[in-house]
Each structure stands twice: as structure tokens, then as C-alpha cells.
């Protein structure tokens, strides 16, 4: 009797814990990618294509699906020394979930990194 009640509860807790860990890992990967993209866009002579390529390479290498990369300003070569350069990377959690995002439906994770131009 106790097993019939406790086993489903323990299974739900286990699945939710795995989903939460996957969400934390995805958030960390987005943070790393945004930092690397901002770092690439911060060097003199950088291009938006270079930033986009670096971010896509990192996200594809980590098998992250449904992502978007935005930059502000859109052209890194247009900034002056000391100007902020922002890279924002976002991804849909359901597309990257182990169980299809049943516990965190319609959740989009995003990370932004701001670095000053050199």
C-alpha cells in the first residue's frame, strides 16, 4: 500500500529534479556563450558575423536547440572605446529538455553579458 502511494510521488520528485538540473546546465551554457560572444565582439575590427559564428559554434557544440543571439549595438565595429557591447543569448527550454519540458512549459531562458569596448 505504501509503495503504491510513495513510488509515484518519488518518481515525480526525481523527474522534476532532473529537469531542474538540465535547466541550470542550459542557463550556464547560455552564460558562457554570451560571454564568449561579447569577448569576440569586443576586440578591434570585430564583426557581427564573427560574434554570431562564435555563439552558434558554441551552442551547436553543446547541442542546444531553438536559440537566438542578439547584439547591441548590432555592428560591433561601430562602437568607440569605452562603449558597452551587449550579447544576449536565449533558448527555449522545452526544445532542450530531457522530458519535453513538462514541468517548465513555455519557459525561455536568456543570458546577457555586457563588456566595455577596448
Image (cartoon, rainbow, N blue to C red):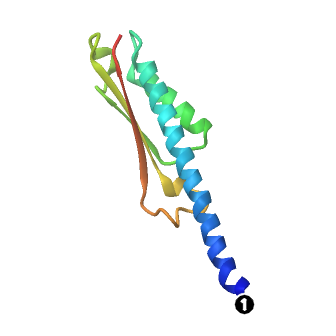
Local packing at callout 1 (Cα closer than 10 Å; few below 14, some 14-19, many 20+) is few
Q: In which quarter of the image is residue 97?
A: bottom right
Q: Is residue 42 above or below residue 31?
A: above
Which residue is the extreme one toward the bottom?
1
Residue 12 location (% of width, % of height): 61, 71
* Horizontal relation, residue 103 to residue 46: left or right: right
Q: Residue at x 73, y 83 (%)?
A: 3
Q: Residue at x 47, y 35 (%)?
A: 31
Q: Quadrant of the C terminus?
A: top left
User: Which residue in the rendered view is the most extreme toward the front?
Assistant: 2
Residue 24 or residue 117, whichever sits in front = 24
The residue that disc 1 covers is 1
Q: In this view, does 94 lie to the left or right of 3?
A: left
Where 95 falls versus 116 (above or below)?
Answer: below
4 above or below 98? below
Q: Where is residue 94 in the image (x, y as percent from the top left)?
A: 51, 58
Query: Horizontally, is 103 left or right of 107 in the view?
Result: right
Q: Which of 40 and 2 is in front in this view?
A: 2
Residue 27 x/y as whole percent: 50, 44
Location of residue 42 in the rendering, given as x and y in whole percent from the top left corner: 39, 16
Look at the image and tell me in which quarter the N terminus lies: bottom right
Secondary element at tag 1: loop
Q: How many labels does the image show?
A: 1
Amino acid at each position: 500500500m505504501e509503495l503504491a502511494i510513495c513510488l509515484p510521488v518519488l518518481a515525480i520528485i526525481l523527474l522534476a529534479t532532473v529537469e531542474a538540473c538540465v535547466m541550470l546546465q542550459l542557463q550556464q551554457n547560455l552564460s558562457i556563450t554570451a560571454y564568449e560572444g561579447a569577448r569576440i565582439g569586443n576586440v578591434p575590427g570585430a564583426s557581427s558575423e564573427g560574434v554570431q559564428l562564435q555563439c552558434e559554434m558554441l551552442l551547436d557544440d553543446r547541442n542546444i536547440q531553438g536559440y537566438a543571439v542578439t547584439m547591441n549595438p548590432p555592428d560591433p565595429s561601430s562602437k568607440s572605446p569605452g562603449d558597452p557591447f551587449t550579447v544576449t543569448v536565449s533558448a527555449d527550454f522545452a526544445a532542450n529538455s530531457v522530458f519535453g519540458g513538462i514541468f517548465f512549459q513555455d519557459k525561455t531562458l536568456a543570458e546577457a553579458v555586457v563588456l566595455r569596448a577596448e
